[in-house]
Image (cartoon, rainbow, N blue to C red):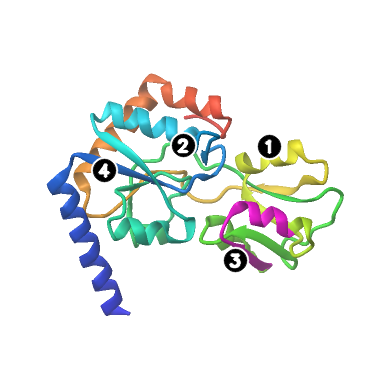
């Protein structure tokens, strides 16, 4: 275990050093599968709240940025190994993740998590089977609550698990679930909302302190002039600052 931790730390240092040497293009890593935060549009391009936010942050920080997509379950390891330079993918800031990577200040407040189930179904939130996307704060919450956790690689698969009877309910960000519940008569919100985490921030390698400072300054400037709240309202992802 110690050897693995040391190897990861050395890998992160090497990746950070490589970025510091080039410093020409910042590669923005996202999932592209979690609307409205990030998704792939009909033109095959990354779109959503975080695409618009990321482009504005890069402009304010005077950085040239490009977008890279990566599956959620390997998004932190591939940041550490240098496949891209940031994670901007609806990732909540948690103490567990801080052990592996660093974060900027938050660019959203904690978004309520919510449950959806088949319309009219009764759900046991502590003893039933609850689906969640793997390696998320919602998956950790389900496990801690005592329910049987059913994890999936993508959020779409969690909804399918409820429809086919594998799971009693899904726990996910309310902003992700709202359009699904609104557009489908068979899926409805159930139970109480849950606040988890410290909001969403950009994930970075711990060695990239200069990049963190640039993005922190850009995020703060958007908070100060109200443009971040305007973007949050536009994409309907929760309360503003």
Residue 235 on the magenta segment: no
Question: Which badge, 3 or 1, comes first in the chain's sequence?
Answer: 3
Q: Which residues are magenta?
A: 147-161
Give the residue at x 70% y 41%.
Answer: 180
Q: Earlier in the sequence, mark 4 or mark 3?
A: 3
On screen, residue 213 above or below 151: above
Measured in 3D between alpha carbons, the distance from the residue under mark 2 to the one under mark 1, in whole angstroms, is: 21 Å
Give coordinates of residue 128: x percent, y percent: 75, 66
Q: Which residue is mark 4?
A: 212
Image height of 146 relative to 226, above or below: below
Nearer the observer: mark 3 or 1; the answer is: 1
Identify residue for label 2: 45
Eye-nearest disc, 1 or 4:
1
Local SS, label 3: helix
* 2 and 4 marks in contact (CB < 8 Å): no
Mark nearest the camera among 3 and 2 is 2
- At 31% from the left and 50% from the top, the residue drawn is 84
Which label number is shown at residue 144?
3
């Amino acid at each position: 275990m110690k050897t693995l931790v040391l190897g990861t730390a050395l890998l992160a240092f090497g990746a950070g050093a490589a970025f510091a040497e080039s410093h020409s293009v910042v590669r923005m890593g996202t999932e592209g599968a979690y609307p409205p935060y990030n998704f792939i549009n009909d033109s095959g391009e990354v779109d959503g709240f975080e695409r618009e936010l990321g482009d504005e942050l890069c402009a304010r920080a005077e950085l040239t940025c490009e977008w890279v997509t990566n599956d959620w379950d390997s998004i932190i390891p591939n940041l550490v190994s240098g496949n891209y330079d940031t994670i901007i993918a609806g990732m909540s800031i948690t103490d567990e993740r801080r052990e592996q990577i660093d974060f900027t200040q938050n660019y959203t407040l904690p978004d309520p998590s919510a449950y959806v189930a088949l319309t009219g179904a009764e759900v046991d939130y502590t003893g039933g089977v609850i689906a969640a996307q793997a390696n998320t704060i919602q998956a950790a919450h389900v496990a801690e609550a005592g329910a049987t956790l059913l994890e999936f690689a993508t959020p779409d698969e969690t909804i399918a698990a409820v429809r086919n009877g594998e799971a009693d309910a899904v726990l996910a960000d309310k902003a992700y679930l709202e359009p699904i519940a609104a557009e489908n008569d068979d899926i409805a919100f159930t139970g109480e909302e849950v606040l988890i985490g410290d909001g969403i921030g950009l994930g970075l390698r711990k060695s990239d302190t200069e990049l963190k400072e640039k993005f922190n300054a850009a995020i703060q400037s958007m908070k100060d002039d109200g443009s971040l709240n305007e973007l949050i309202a536009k994409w309907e992802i929760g309360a503003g600052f």
